[in-house]
Image (cartoon, rainbow, N blue to C red):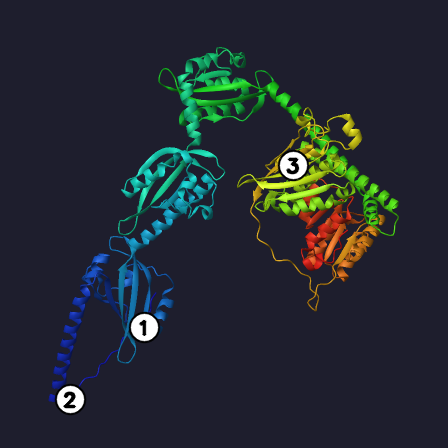
Amino acid sequence: MNAPLKRSHDDSSDKDGSVAGLTGATQNIDERRRTELRLAEQARLLDLSFDAIFVRDAENRITYWSKGAESAYGFSREEALGRDPHKLLCTEFPEPFERIYEALLRDGRWVGELIHTRKDGARVVDSTRWALDRDAEGRPSSILETNTDITERKRAEESRFRLAAIVESSEDAIVSKDLNGVITTWNAGAERLFGYTAQEAIGQPVTMLIPTDHLDEEPFVLSRIRRGERAERYETVRRRKDGKLIDVSLTVSPIVDAHGRIIGASKIVRNITARKKAEATLRRNEALFSTLVEQAPTGVYVVDSQFRLQQVNALALPAFENVNQHIGRDFSEVMHILWGPDVGGEIVRIFRHTLETGEAYVSPRFTEFRHDLDEERSYEWQIQRITLPDGENGIVCYFQDVTEQVSSERALRDAKAAAEAANSSKDRFLAILSHELRTPLTPVLMTAAALEHDPDLRRDVREDLAMIRRNIELETKLIDDLLDLNRIINGKLQLSLEAVDLKESVSQVCDICRSQINERHICLETELDPAVSHVTADPARFQQVLWNVLKNAIKFTPENGTIRISAKLLSRELCELRVSDSGVGIPADVLPRIFNAFEQGNARVTREFGGLGLGLAISKALMELHRGSIRAESSGTGQGSTFIIEIPVAEAPSADPLATLPSQDGKPRQLRLLLVEDHADTSRTLARLLRNAGFSVLTASDLASATAIVAQEPIDLLISDLGLPDGSGYELMNALRTKRSVPGIAMSGYGMEEDVRRSRDAGFSEHLVKPINLEDLLSAIRRVAGSRALAANVKQS
């Protein structure tokens, strides 16, 4: 309880009874009278305040009680004077009184909030201000307390908080917008209904939710809002973020500011899609009731308002053949006979709920034990509340016995699972076969490609080496085509689309084919419209299509022939790339089949030119995945052919600053590579060729030795086989990334989409499939290094 203030007493008096003493007494009386008048005037002024004001003395007794206090608390001045105010008003303090009193003594004032109880028992919240008065000797003598009733304001604040909580927890979407139709608030219900987060929606025009054919609704609603009218519970259609249209009921109300001006609108949106569907179904059922029961293609029966089985059609009769006198019988009894007390009781509960509420029920496929048949049966069923001919509500149930279908589907699922397991085994077998075929080819291909250009070898030897290289590349291409065809058939071929430089892609494909073009003395012409800069493509797969088409042109073009590559814009969204040759042409009867798998026109073409006839089929599938197309034109045999590729254009990406690897003196330094390969021939050949290309190369044959090198040597780039004797390249890359940021190139005989994705996920920038051509590896190093200084160290092969 509060400590009373100490009183001070001045009991001095003039004891001699002299005239001087009498004069002093008279003066004291006059002074007291003036003080009383001044205090009375001050009290009169205080009584003018609407606030509750009172004063308590050193003993914590009320010495002044204003009219505002009388009005605020219901206690008259006579009832209040001399009372402890805090007992009188049952004061509730926000903190212990001792702390408040200490602050008052220290600062001479205290401001806070109190709860007081009126005479009639009502509790009021006051904003209070205490002021401490001291006597001439500095001792506390009285406290002036001024209280302002803020009960309504606090209630308003609580109402606002409560309203905000209600809005946020509402199952309905509650949205507000300004008079321009811009969304200003967005609750959790709106997120659930429309799929947009508040961050995505606020600040956007509300028309993003309105289908095109309903856009005229928004101006109409806003015009009503501006007039202060409500648009209450009108039904329409709105669009979710995923594009799905939903039926909704809207109530739109004006929002006014403190001055009564309309500043926007609040909108309550309720999803009535299910209701609309149920209503549509119900209307159809009511219109066709008489024919639905007897002529429906499914079993139909009706339960009336008294919960009796009223009508059963011919298709439904077999389900009730073991129930005597089922028509007119209590539906609960019928269900218990068919399904027993547990399942039958649950069905009865669902029927009663629909009869009482009108909520339709669609059962999931239902398989349970039929007591009357002593076996399991499966059904699909749904129920609706309908109005029967007598005007009473009833239930109609539509059902089908799907026991045989369920059994067939179970067998089909088992067969599908077995087929998928077999298909998965086949895919894995192809991947392993590919790996085993590719791995030993890598050192042979790289050695042959390097020696082919060795000037110290005789020309006939270099020609033999070129023949070896071409045939290894052909075998690799056949393996790739078979794997790609398998991916396409199984729908597992996925693209990673980006903006691709068309000129660079064409140039790279031409460079890859340059040796064959030169060998056959073919004139290659290119004419690329400068307006065509970039296309939307998967870089590797787009180059594969270009390579297939160009290789096809080279194959069928005789020596000293001509191949022409051109590109132009067809529209703002599409460009056309043409590859024309002066070759053997395509007969008219073959042209429609040219993109079929294993199709090369005739046996003579297959014998003369080789191949499996998969390249163009794969190219067609790849272009369709690019949302483009490929087709062929030819005037006939000996007239050459033209392949036309159409592909979406893309805006050129902003150029990224090139990375550099400066040494301590600021000059570019030699790139240090760590080559990890357990196949000895491949490791030896690769290391030699990379050193010849200007790189510093460290080698390791397993995970342990590679990890040891990484711990001791600075590495700029990792080139690693994925299958290592004591672990994997994935583990090596993960270990390396924990120490420093080093890019990596993965090498593997496995080239399925899952293998490439797994390499990317592990942190490798590139995934090269064996056998690896040196130029392909050097190109990958250039891309990963990303620096002109580093690229300058890479010799052209």
Mark 2 surroundings within 10 Å by alpha-carbon count, few (fewer than 14), some (14 through 19), many (20 or more): few
- Tell me where residue 208 sits by quadrant: top left
Q: CA distance from mark 1 to mark 3?
A: 85 Å
**Residue assigned mark 1:** 108
Amino acid at dot 3:
Leu
Residue 344 horizontal/vertical position (percent): 52, 22
**Residue assigned mark 2:** 16
Q: Residue at x 81, y 53 (%)?
A: 689
* Label located before the other in sequence (3 or 2): 2
Residue 59 horizontal/vertical position (percent): 28, 70
Residue 422 vertical placement versus 711 (above, below): above
Q: Would you say 627 lies left or right of 762 here?
A: left
- Secondary structure under tag 2 reads loop
* Label located before the other in sequence (1 or 3): 1
Res 622 label? 3
- Secondary structure under tag 1 reads loop
Residue 627 horizontal/vertical position (percent): 59, 37
Q: Nearer the viewer, residue 660 or 213?
A: 660
- Tell me where residue 310 sits by quadrant: top left
Callout count: 3
Can you tell which of label 1 and label 2 is closer to the viewer? Answer: 1
Q: Would you say 197 lies left or right of 718 here?
A: left
Q: CA distance from mark 1 to mark 2?
A: 42 Å
Amino acid at dot 2:
Asp
